Amino acid sequence: MFYTLIDFPLGSIFLAKRGKALSIAKYINSDQKFEKTLEIFKAKKIALKYDENKFKREKESFSKYFRGEKEDFRSLPLDFLSGTPYQKRVWLEARKIPFGQTETYKSLALKLNHRGYRSVGQALGQNPLLIVIPCHRVVSSDGSLGGFSAGLELKKFLLRLERREIFL
DNA sequence: TACATAAGAATAG
DNA sequence: CTATTCTTATGTA
């Protein structure tokens, strides 16, 4: 697989793909995280090669996004390496949430016609495509943020960015 | 408002 | 089967 890194004020985004479509978008905020990410691939015996030229399209989308412009990554092709059928359904549903808007775990669960609120959260927690699949736009129904695997700081940052409360 | 508790769906071990 | 998870609703003080 190929990978590249994109820097932004809170750290970097690690992107990886094997073919045309993007598979991984992970938040990296320290050298240790980066090392650890490389080790995971090594453990799975997946060869990684740095090649930023294969991510032209993604880089453009991310730089637009971090500039505060409306960028939904909606047209970006994805390639899921992992995930149960249920998790993919949750991810695809979350992907429909428009830029700058939020949904609750509850409303997402109801769209998938069940009441397993926590299972929605659990599935979002497995999201391999941070930002591209906007799981940060899913919040608790009482208005609080809920959780976030990559850290609530990042979730807050992304939401403020989309509300145009911060400018880079 | 704050805290405990049950219910809820799906997954990992 | 049990424990765990990016939850919600209800009860009680």
Image: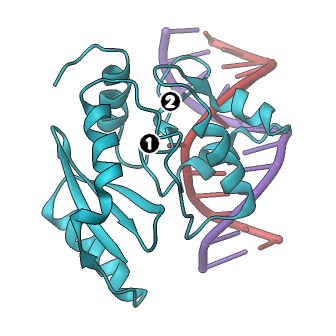
Chain colours: A cyan, B purple, C red
- Residue A120 is situated, as x and y percent measured from the top left of the image, at 67, 44
Q: Which residue is mark 1?
A: A148
Check disc 2: other Cα within 10 Å, few if <14, some if 14-19, many if 20+: many
Q: Tag count in the figure? A: 2
Residue type indicated by callout 2: Arg
Q: CA distance from mark 2 to mark 1?
A: 10 Å
Q: Is residue A142 above or below residue A120?
A: above
Q: In the picture, residue A26 is in which quadrant?
A: bottom left
Q: Which residue is mark 2?
A: A137
Q: Chain of mark 2?
A: A
Q: Chain of mark 1?
A: A
Report the side of A168 relative to A22 (left or right).
left
Q: Nearer the viewer, residue A79 or A119?
A: A79
Residue at the spot x=22%, y=18% of the render?
Answer: A166
- Residue A35 is situated, as x and y percent measured from the top left of the image, at 21, 73
Quadrant where the N terminus of chain A sits is bottom left
Check disc 1: other Cα within 10 Å, few if <14, some if 14-19, many if 20+: some
Q: Secondary structure at mark 2?
A: helix
Quadrant where the C terminus of chain A sits is top left
Report the side of A149 relative to A133 (left or right).
left
* Disc assigned to residue A139: none
Q: Nearer the viewer, residue A90 or A66?
A: A66
